[in-house]
Image (cartoon, grey):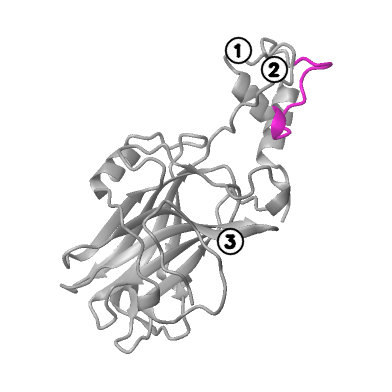
Amino acid sequence: MRPKFIPAAVLTIALAGAASTAAADHPPAPVTKVPPVDQKTWEASQTREFGATTINIMQIPAAAFRSEYSAGKFSWADFGYFGPDSDSGSGYLWAPVTIPTGVKLLYMNGYYQDTNASADVAFYLYRTTGGAGISPGLELLASSSSSAAPGYGFASAAVSPDYLGAPSGYTVDNYANGATDPTPDLKGGQYFIEVYFGDVTGGLAIRGVELVWQRQISPAPGTATFSDVPVTHTFFQSVEALRASGITTGCGGTNYCPDATVTRGQMAAFLARALGLHWDH
């Protein structure tokens, strides 16, 4: 039987036995709501250009979701909305999330239809954890829901650890190598969205979920690679990120030559390595 969720940011569970199809054995996790206007206002203030200031949106349409349990029955409604049938034995849907390691997740936004006066539809973003020698577990990263039968709506939640204002965000880590990782219980995993319909008799449906994210520069290492770019250098983090990604190897010896000019040939090398150029197909 699948264990019940508890109201905690990190949920470590032992997976044993068969998963139950009964909704009573799988109550929804607590929901944290952020007014959509806060997120939209913050998005509008950001620069739209390539790089770490870009606002990227991953769309997960309703068509990507499937019933979490075999007893679930779901159908399409008008305008691309998807919801449970009245005879569904489960109110749970799920969909996988594939997103690059190192990006910063900012918001999870759920689009819904709610005309049910007694129940809501809730959205949850989880990361699975565990590996070789490490007990499996779940980490709840964000949750949001509809409320009070508002009709068609939009439920937004900032991704932990920051739930207020412009988020500090959550850095994605897809690495899950188990016991070979120094902190295997905290590193790596797979991500998925879970949707819970509080009532399957009608009035609840979803159109999809979107994840808002940004690229970011990797954290600076504790020691310097180049002798002329010490840890106290203004551009230490950026230079080390270029080296770690293979975009630069320095200017010879143990130097980077941070104050030297860049030739057109060197510029071509930097851009080609950074963008992965060029493939015909």
Say if residue 177 shows up in the picture.
no
Q: Which residue is mark 1?
A: 232
Taken as a whole, is the magenta stretch helix, strand or loop?
A: loop
Specify the quadrant of the image occupied by residue 273: top right
Q: Residue furthest right?
A: 253
User: Of helix, strand and loop, which one carries label 1?
Assistant: loop
Numbered range of the magenta stretch: 243-255
Tell me if 202 is positioned left or right of 148 in this view: right
Residue 262 — which label?
2
x, y (%) of residue 200?
29, 81
Q: Which residue is mark 3?
A: 136
Which mark is in front, 3 or 1? 3
Tell me if 90 is positioned left or right of 99 in this view: left
Of pointers 3 and 1, the one earlier in the residue sequence: 3
Relative vertical location of residue 124 with respect to residue 172 in this rendering, above or below:
below
**Cα distance in 3D space between marks 2 and 3:** 49 Å
Which mark is in front, 2 or 1? 1
Q: Nearer the viewer, residue 97 or 2?
A: 2
Check disc 3: other Cα within 10 Å, few if <14, some if 14-19, many if 20+: some
x, y (%) of residue 10?
46, 52
User: Of helix, strand and loop, which one carries label 3?
Assistant: strand
**Cα distance in 3D space between marks 2 and 1:** 23 Å
Q: Are marks 3 and 1 in contact (CB under 8 Å)?
A: no
Specify the quadrant of the image occupied by residue 204: bottom left
Residue 253 — which label?
none
**Cα distance in 3D space between marks 3 and 1:** 40 Å
Q: Residue furthest bottom?
A: 87
